[in-house]
Amino acid sequence: MNTTIFIFIFLAVGFYLLLCEAAKLPLIAYRKTMLQVVSDNQSKGSLLKVTEMNLALRLSKLIKLSEYRKKTMSDSLRAAGIPFTPELHLAQIIARFLMRSLLALPAASINPIASIMVIVWAVYTMFGEFKSTDKIIRQKRDRIESDLPRLTAMISQKIKASKDVIGILDSFLPSAGVELREQLQITLAEMRTGSPDRALSKLELRVGSTMMREVVLGLQSVLHGDDINAYFEKLERDLSQEEIQKLKLNNMQRPGKVRLYTTLALGWFILTAFGILGIYAYVKAKALI
């Protein structure tokens, strides 16, 4: 059995090298160096990562998207901080699926059930990665919203003495979270070089949050010279209450998550037990035959 696995691995490596030579692909060391330059992933430079990216680049040429779909995905990837085109992002997910699926071949030499489990795992992981961008955006938005009550409280205090929106936002940068600080830095740069009103509108669009929209509307009113003290005092109370409600909701959901994980662990234990019994029955039946 072990001999079969080693033969398969050597043949796979041999065919890979022959195909690379036939296709005139750049050397692995060259692709590895290039990947280290363009990638900030923790696994950058690894052989698997190089092979995955090389396959994704070729698959991306076969993927065609409509203009609407391409623009929507580009905005999502930009918001999530993923420096790839929509085609390359989809191709990378497919490349990972194909590479994981290859593990089913050596698994099949051990047991057919193991190969099926590998395919199911590869499909499940692929669908999870399709939703990963939305998950990253949602997490970033939640972290930004958690900072907005403090930002609103500071604005409520400072606009009583000054209407300098740029100065107020700049003074909040040292205490802001990573995500909100990044967005504020972009906005402040645009406010200093262009229209402050337009820069605030672009901040609202980038974050895509109702809470941020309310803060932006207030700041735009300050730029227009309106007396907005009462608005920010009320907004400070509302955002603080909303944050408290979110914390209560998270605490209420935790017992449900614990039950879910317990159920999954029990299901996995039962599946493992039946898998062992199935393998044992298969071996016995094969021995009798």
Image (cartoon, rainbow, N blue to C red):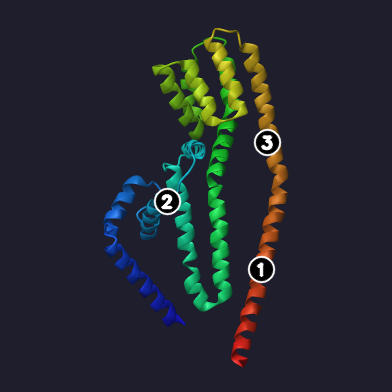
Q: What crowding class fits label 3: few (fewer than 14 Cα within 10 Å), some (14-19), or many (20 or more)? A: few
The mark that comes first in sequence, 2 or 1, is 2
**In the image, which disc is placed on residue 58?**
none
User: x%, y% of residue 232?
Assistant: 62, 17
In the structure shown, which secondary structural element does the residue marked by tag 3 occupy?
A: helix
210 versus 159 height, above or below: below
Residue occupied by mark 2: 62
Answer yes or no: is residue 177 visible.
no
Tell me the quarter of the picture where residue 55 sits. Answer: bottom left
> In screen coordinates, is 19 left or right of 103?
left
Picture layout, residue 231 above or below residue 209: above
First in residue order: circle 2 vs circle 3: 2
> Counting residues from the N terminus, which is met first, the one under dot 1 or under dot 3?
3
At mark 1, the secondary structure is helix
* Three-letter code, disc 1: Phe
* Numbered mark located on residue 269 in the image: 1
Badge 3 is on which residue? 246
Q: Mark yes or no: residue 50 visible.
A: yes
